[in-house]
Image (tube, rainbow, N blue to C red):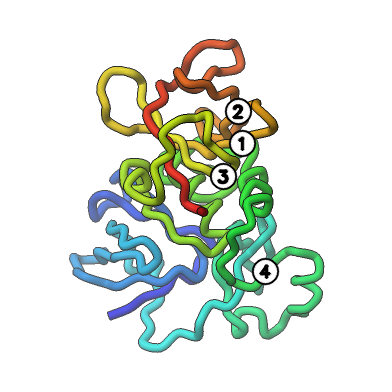
Amino acid sequence: MNGICRLSIVPLRKQPSDASEQVSQLLYGEQVVIEEEKGNWYVVKCINDNYRGWVDKKQIALNINVENTSYIVNSRVLEINGSYIPLGSLLSKDDLKDQNIEDLLRKKKIKIRSKSLDLSQLINNAKKYINAPYLWGGRTPFGIDCSGLSQMVYQLNSISLPRDAYQQAEEGKLIHSLDFAQSGDLAFFNKGTNDKITHVGIILKTGETLQIIHASGWVQINTLNEKGILDNNGYLSHHYLLTKRIIH
């Protein structure tokens, strides 16, 4: 059985309880496969990234056939049919039947879903999340975590990434030195206590200058070097592990 998110944001939880931690979010228009039912809860698998979690049954619309989502929200928030839909949400023509689609496209409030390898567009996507507060499991400009940021930035280019940082590190092509990094590459980090990946950010490169856009407290841009990320006070906040290129 399939379902679709018809609310602006729905929490995906670790356990079937409102008190359970949020591990991710479903955005408007995202579809799921319902794998299990327990009381007022479903275990769902997100079709986009195969991520699993529990959702309140009231927050998922059941469906058999859903029109393809032809558009993606391209502004931080978009008001549609009385609801405020966040950046990265998916829309069908039916969702927009009372809207002037051409006007929304012209104003860049939405865009047609089409895979893009344009790195400048990717970086512009990332900058739309600047100053978004850090939120564990978040995927919107109103709260986002580090891997949610990288996933959503690529989703805006219609490129799918897994949900968690360690999963994203298994994607793409390994770049053996930061000397060869380019804007849009994903860099992975930890706190220096072991080799486990705990953090991810998106590299920004201007000439020989390396920076990283990442969610740590909030989405911000910091200096990147071969040791890791330097915070605004110049201290090493995250230890560098590796770089992967998704667009190549």
Q: Residues within 10 Å of mark 4 (few under 14, many from 20)?
A: many
Real-space Cα separation, disc 3 to disc 1, in angstroms:
7 Å
The reply, left or right, for residue 108 in relation to residue 219 is right
Real-space Cα separation, disc 3 to disc 4, in angstroms:
20 Å
First of labels 4, 2 by sequence position: 4
Tell me whether circle 3 and circle 4 mark residues in contact (CB < 8 Å).
Answer: no
Q: Nearer the viewer, residue 141 or 160?
A: 160
Q: Which residue is mark 1?
A: 204
Q: How far across and down, in percent of the image, does residue 107 sit?
A: 80, 65
Q: Residue at x 32, y 78 (%)?
A: 2
First of labels 3, 1 by sequence position: 3
Residue 22 seen anywhere in this rendered image of the structure: no
- Tell us which disc is closer to us: 3 or 4: 3
Q: Which residue is mark 4?
A: 111
Q: Residues within 10 Å of mark 3 (few under 14, many from 20)?
A: many
As drawn, 145 above or below 139? above
First of labels 2, 3 by sequence position: 3
Real-space Cα separation, disc 2 to disc 1, in angstroms:
6 Å
Quarter of the rendering containing residue 5? bottom left
